[in-house]
Amino acid sequence: MTSANWSEPAGGGPADTVGLIGLGPMGAPIAGRIADAGYRLRVWNRTRETAEQLRPHAEVADGVERLSSQVILSALPDIDHLDRLTPSSVLEQWQHDGTARLIVLSTTSPDKVRALAARVAPFDIEVVDAAMSGGDAGATAGTLSLMVGADPETFGDLLPLLRTFATTIENMGPLGTGAAAKLCNQLVVAGTLVSLAEALHLARKSGLSDSQVARVLKGGLASSAVLDLKADKLLGRTYELGGSAVNQLKDLRYAVALGDDVGARLPLARESAALFEEAVNQGLGDHDHAVIQEVLDAPQLHHTNQNRISSP
């Protein structure tokens, strides 16, 4: 398999062309960071009008099969979306045009990453999982955290490219370990959001100022990046999309399934997943995951049932 040298992006040759699928809240700013770093960028998005906003910084592919570049990144929500977009006919075209590596930025399961790798291997395409954390703010600032699953040589080849949009980049081990590490991350994010929602719910019920409580939390041991990023949404009870509640539920289901596979007890993850399932069932799935606090004010009290969390 051809190895690209990503340390010198300028120059316009085929080895410095990067493709990117998915221009949502994460993909669009990542694309901008890659283009600003001097790489030739080729993008595709289901809604073409969104992709057109990147001109003249990127070439807009007419179809997924025309996206072929030596490295393609998928910023889609999950591998299921990528699977539907890449039948054998697309992979054959990518192989013909020299695509060598497919980087999955999605939060997904280790099993799905490995299944994708097996599916594309006959087309001489190598899969790397590089699950990202930091939200749309981190993507815009280029300060994402990446949890990578790749062999050391591949990781070294891709590191300059990854550094265009991330500052914390860890090679966790072989394929699938990046996905597993991201699920660990998502347990902390979801659990913290649930704890913050409960704290502010208790504060309001106790006649306290929720904004005062948030300030003292920020100043003490309860401070966190989640609180810093989500305080305005939690206090204002406005939930314009960042990370969605439905995707948080997906991630928790993957984490619970992985825990079952490896024998890890995850009681808080199961309870958090049950709460996010309630949020989705109430029609709140497309809101920012901070919307979980609204479940606490629902008329019917939540009852713990750790056995009802379905597998993804």
Image (cartoon, rainbow, N blue to C red):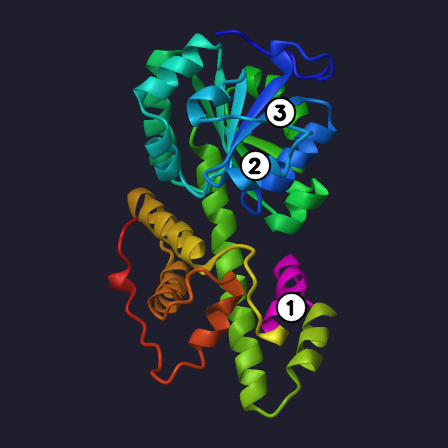
Mark 1: give few (<14), some (14-19) or many (20+) Cα within 10 Å.
some
The residue type indicated by label 3 comes to Leu
Residue drawn at (49%, 22%), measured in percent from left and top?
67
Residue drawn at (48%, 15%), measured in percent from left and top?
99
> Do callouts 3 and 2 mark residues in contact (Cβ within 8 Å)?
no
Which x, y percent locates residue 75? 51, 37
The residue type indicated by label 2 comes to Ala
SS assignment at label 1: helix
Q: Report the predominant secondary structure element of the magenta stretch.
A: helix
The residue type indicated by label 1 comes to Ala
Disc 3/disc 1 C-alpha distance (Å): 35 Å
Give the extent of the magenta segment: 220-234
- The verdict on residue 226 being magenta is yes
Q: Which residue is mark 3?
A: 41
Q: Which residue is mark 2?
A: 51
> Do callouts 2 and 1 mark residues in contact (Cβ within 8 Å)?
no
Dot 3 or dot 2: first in sequence order is 3
The answer to which of 136 and 173 lies nearer the viewer is 136
Disc 2/disc 1 C-alpha distance (Å): 31 Å
The relative height of residue 207 versus residue 92 in the rendered view (above or below) is below
SS assignment at label 2: helix
Q: Which disc is residue 212 wearing?
A: none
Q: Is residue 205 left or right of residue 280?
A: right
The relative height of residue 92 versus residue 179 in the rendered view (above or below) is above
